[in-house]
Image: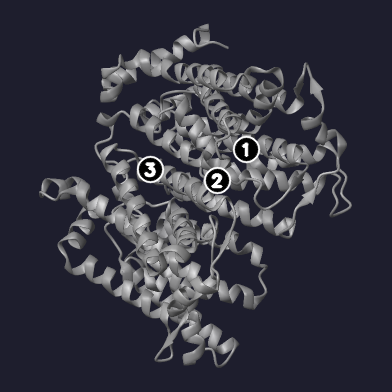
Amino acid sequence: MNEVFSIRRIFEGKWTQGAIPLVLLVALLLIIEIAAPGFLTGETLALLFANTAVLFILATGVTFAILLGGIDLSIQAVASLASVMLAQLLPALGFAAFPVAILSGLAFGLLSGIVHVKLRVPSFVATLATGGVVTGLALWVSNGRAITIEEAGREKTAWINATIFGLPMVVLISALIGIVSFLALRYTRFGRQATAVGAGEPAAWAAGINVDRTKIIAFAASGMLAAVAGVVLAARLSSGSPVLANQLLLPAIAAVIVGGTAITGGLGGVARTAVGALIISIVRIGMTFVGVNIFLENMVFGAVLIAAVAITIDRSKIAVIK
Amino acid sequence: MTIDTEPLKSVSDIERTTLMTFLPGRIATMLGGRRWRRLAPVAVLVVLCILITIANPNFIELRNLVRLANSAAVPLTLAMGLTFIILMGSIDLSVEGTLSVAAMVVVLLAANDSNGNDYGWWAVLAAIASGTIMGLISGLVQTMLRIPSFMATLGMWFVGLGLSVYMLGGSAIRLNEASIRDLALHRFLGLPLAVWVAVGAFVLAAIIQYHTRLGRHILAIGGDEDVTKLSGVNVTRVRIAAFALAGFFFGIAGVLAAAQLGQSHAVIGDGRLFAAVTAVVVGGTALTGGEGGVVNTLIGVLIVTVLANGMILLGISPYIQQTVQGLMIIAAVALSLDRVRLKIVK
């Protein structure tokens, strides 16, 4: 145990300052550039960003929950439900299907937050439960099938797949979400309070912060962004399905942690998550490149998650590790 | 096995001491406190059975009861393992990953339609061993790297899932070993052998919880880890052993699942974590640890299975099951948490 301790100490100073993820990202980019010259051109980079967009939006949402010291295990379910709702409602509602799908995410995020805060259920169980509720609803609404977005609906989702000034629309959407979230966390009262709650809940409470409200807002944001990710995913794939985003839960949480946001809360932010999401994305591309079997991807991400948690966690904050 | 058997009494003594220090939940107190909370799951089960029978008398037909027992076999075995983890106040999210690894191992080592292996029942032993090893790794990761169990096991969940899908090559592989298939097909006293295996798992879990040092130590850790440590218990070792024990039960469940389906594929574990957590929590085992046990979980598994079965009998879409289970988790946890113990809920 002491060995791990000392390894942790080496990492602690640098990693927690957010330098290591960035160095790792640059190193990975350079490695790929050396292995396959021409990678660092505008076009491939735009493609990389486009492929990272959905993961980044999901990870940005869950950053809010993790920054508070909680976790949101319902994001993949909420995203899938949003994709189903979009595909289902586009023919009838037209463009109004977008806000409806996104608001469903907001509603379930609120539900998670309220269950977690008001009923005082630990967040991983509260969100596991709401995740189940949402998955059940998505299966029920869609009859357990994938719903294809037909030609008429595709006209209304085309703007998401469009390219503006040489940049895919999804990149602009995720950049906008990233910037708004970054500003919200850094410059608004909510952001400061969220960081304070994550850093030390009793102190934040004693300082007069409405801890409950801050937490509920964070979980609502997480749910809403998960729904946005689901909508974007549905538009890109031209289909909605109750299991559409199931494979994204682990990469999204891994992106947040690898970026340098500690699961103990109070440390980290959206900028780190952007770096983390790019790392995850590049590692995924790199694995295919090196010839790692695609089925092993989950295994690698699982191991990466454990390693990243072990390095970034602030053990002084947990009296008993359960 | 009833709640009033002799060995259970000493355990309830331990529980009572923890409860004297910590007030039970507000709502539970309002409705009669401790006694109500212990009997609530049984009452829910009985009421559920009566209501479903009134709505559709086919429910109490022998054929349906056998079907009920059969579909309870895998969740019961899984929930036995999970109970020990939750009793410690931890959580094991790797249920689906470990189960799929065990199912993958048994299918690939016994006679199958993908490779030439034919190790018979050695495959079953290997599958249970691989489940135990997965649990052991979870325990080592959690205690040695000192990270919370939900993160350690979230990682192990996907490690297991990735490993089993990789080994299966992403396809479904059939299990051709007749003697293992007999677990699901052969009947003894009217019930499939898988049900008897699950009953065996329950008895084993009950013996471990109520009659071994490990069981007492797990309960003590859940009650108060610091005090347990000060009493000279090697908490790290107990934790690792508990995770390995859980992996052992998940391994058995993996074999049963493979035998029931006659094959193993990527999604063999889908939804199992959820059902297992629901069963444990609904049975009355507190997520804070130190309260509840395998008897509670037996009731919880029956509630979950009866409800699923009843919903099918009543013609309710099976898709909505997870929604109902999710709401049940929320309700059960909200009713059973000792909020006074939890100043900070994360």
Q: Are marks 2 and 3 in contact (CB under 8 Å)?
A: no
Q: Quadrant of the C terminus of chain A?
A: top left
SS class, disc 3: helix
Parent chain of label 3 = A
Are labels 1 and 3 on one chain? no
Which numbered tag is attached to residue B324?
none
Mark 1 Cα within 10 Å, few/some/many (few <14, many 20+)?
A: many
Cα distance between the residues tagged 2 and 1:
9 Å
**Mark 2 or mark 1, which has the lower sequence index?**
2
Whole-percent x and y of residue A286? 58, 76
Check the image and report above or below for A57 versus A204: below
Give the Cα distance between marks 1 and 3. 24 Å
- For badge 2, the amino acid type reads Ser
Residue beneath the point at 35% across and 70% down: A272
Check the image and report above or below for B2 versus B193. above
Category of crowding for the residue at label 2, using alpha-carbon neighbours closer than 10 angstroms: few (below 14), some (14–19), many (at least 20): many
Are the numbered discs 2 and 1 placed on the same chain, yes or no?
yes
Does residue A321 lie above or below A22 as drawn? above
**Mark 2 — residue?**
B94
Q: Which residue is mark 1?
A: B250
Disc 2 + disc 1, Cβ < 8 Å:
yes
Q: Position of residue B295 (x, y in %)?
A: 53, 20
Q: Residue at x 41, y 54 (%)?
A: A5
- Packing grade of label 3 (10 A; few <14, some 14-19, many >=20) is many
Which residue is label 3 attached to? A126
